[in-house]
Image (tube, rainbow, N blue to C red):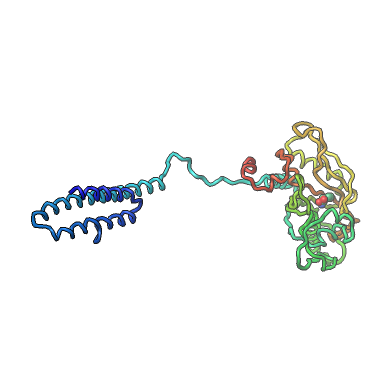
């Protein structure tokens, strides 16, 4: 009899050790299977007498029952453990904060651009968009910057394979490029404007137009590109072009328009504007526009915000207009720079890193 207890102990130990249902079934086979130890014991009874069979059989049955009970217990244990693991894995913590989709909002540069459009809109300026892949003609030549002009060296950019859209006179062989400024929109917009109004006036469309037409008053905001990269320059940046052409538009109009714009943009009258003589091929005379705040964190420093000037007679001609009759001013301002000044951002690259922690501060 006491030869049975070690077998029961061994079975209990084996079942307890089984980590998976498969392990447990293997262990079961060792004891209760067809050639398991208990089955072998039963077979061994054949040689016993009838009396011996009774006592031995009862003892073996008891041991078998103990082993089966251990097996049932082990199965239950494994099932319980599996359930517990599953519950743990699928645990739902109802006290966690809910997951929300972010609200989203406009980029600070877009906010600045919207502001600029609204302010110039209130002064009667149209808003125009133009292509970022631009023909050499519009970007340079029509702006009085022919191929060998030294001013081109300040506009190193990215050239695009493929033919050129020749804009009106220039050779069609120069490659297209990523526009280096929004100034080509001066030509594109003015040419359309002139075409429309000289047709309406019954003009033949030949030569320069010297008839009457409504003034050209437009801003053209958008992306521009140059090979340039540091804390205040990015290979992609934003400009807004301004153009006002009429019969009697002078520098004093540029000053009043720009002063109105800049004081509205920064929501303060406590700033000064100055025109600093400069050079651009497409304006004559040309000036940089600097501003100086009289209060606030930027107080007392002249800050350059724009190029500007009176539109060069050759550019007026390239618009299809007679410079004897038409005159105007133009400016080109950096939108990113205006946004940096308005929001107190000191590194331009922050605008283009896409870091939500930075961007969400403008919502
Ligand atoms: N296009 C010039 C630049 O990117 C800026 C500029 C200067 C624009 C004078 C103008 C202007 O319209 O009149 O450097």
Percent position of residue 357, x then y: 62, 42
Vertical placement of 146 versus 258: above or below? below
As drawn, is 147 to the left or to the right of 235?
Answer: right
Q: Is residue 311 left or right of residue 52?
A: right
Where, quadrant-wise, is the C terminus in this rendering? top right
Q: Position of residue 336 (x, y in %)?
A: 73, 46
Residue 289, by quadrant, is top right
x and y, in percent, of residue 115 in the image: 70, 44
- Of residues 215 and 63, the one nearer the viewer is 63
Residue 254 drawn above or below residue 35: above
Examine the image and state in which quarter residue 190 appears: bottom right
Q: Residue at x 77, y 31 (%)?
A: 295
Which residue is outermost to the left?
51
Residue 126 makes an appearance in the image: no
- 139 or 60, which is in the foreground? 60
Name the spot of residue 192 as percent of width and height, x first. Answer: 78, 60
């Amino acid at each position: 009899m006491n030869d049975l207890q070690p077998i029961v102990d061994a079975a209990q130990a084996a079942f307890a050790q089984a980590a998976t249902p498969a392990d447990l079934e293997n262990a079961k086979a060792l004891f209760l299977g067809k050639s398991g130890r208990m089955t072998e014991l039963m077979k061994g009874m054949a040689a016993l007498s009838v009396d011996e069979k009774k006592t031995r059989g009862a003892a073996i049955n008891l041991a078998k029952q103990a082993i089966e009970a251990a097996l049932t217990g082990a199965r239950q244990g494994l099932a319980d453990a599996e359930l517990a693991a599953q519950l743990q894995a699928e645990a739902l913590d109802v006290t966690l904060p809910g997951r929300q989709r972010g609200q989203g909002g406009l980029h600070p540069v877009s906010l600045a651009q919207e502001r600029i459009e609204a302010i110039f809109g209130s002064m009667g300026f149209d808003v125009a968009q133009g292509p970022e892949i631009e023909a050499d003609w519009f970007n340079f030549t029509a702006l009085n910057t022919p191929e060998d002009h030294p001013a081109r060296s300040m506009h190193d950019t990215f050239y695009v394979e493929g033919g050129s859209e020749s804009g009106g006179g220039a050779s069609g062989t120069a490659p297209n490029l990523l526009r280096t400024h929004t100034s080509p929109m001066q030509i594109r917009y003015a040419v359309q404007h002139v075409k429309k109004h000289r047709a309406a006036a019954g003009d033949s469309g030949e030569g320069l137009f010297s008839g009457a037409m409504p003034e050209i008053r437009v801003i053209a905001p958008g992306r521009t590109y140059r090979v340039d990269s540091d804390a205040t320059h990015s290979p992609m940046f934003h400009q807004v072009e301004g153009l006002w052409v009429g019969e009697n538009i002078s520098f004093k109009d540029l000053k009043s328009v720009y002063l109105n714009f800049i004081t509205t943009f920064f929501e303060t009258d406590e700033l000064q504007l100055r025109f600093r003589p400069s050079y651009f091929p497409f304006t004559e005379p040309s000036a940089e526009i600097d501003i100086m705040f009289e209060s606030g964190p930027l107080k007392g420093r002249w800050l350059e915000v724009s190029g500007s000037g009176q539109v060069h007679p050759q550019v007026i001609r390239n618009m299809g207009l007679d410079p004897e009759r038409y005159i105007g001013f133009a400016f080109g301002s950096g939108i990113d720079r205006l946004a940096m000044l308005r929001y107190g951002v000191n590194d331009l690259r922050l605008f283009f890193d896409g870091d939500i922690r930075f961007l969400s501060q403008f919502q």
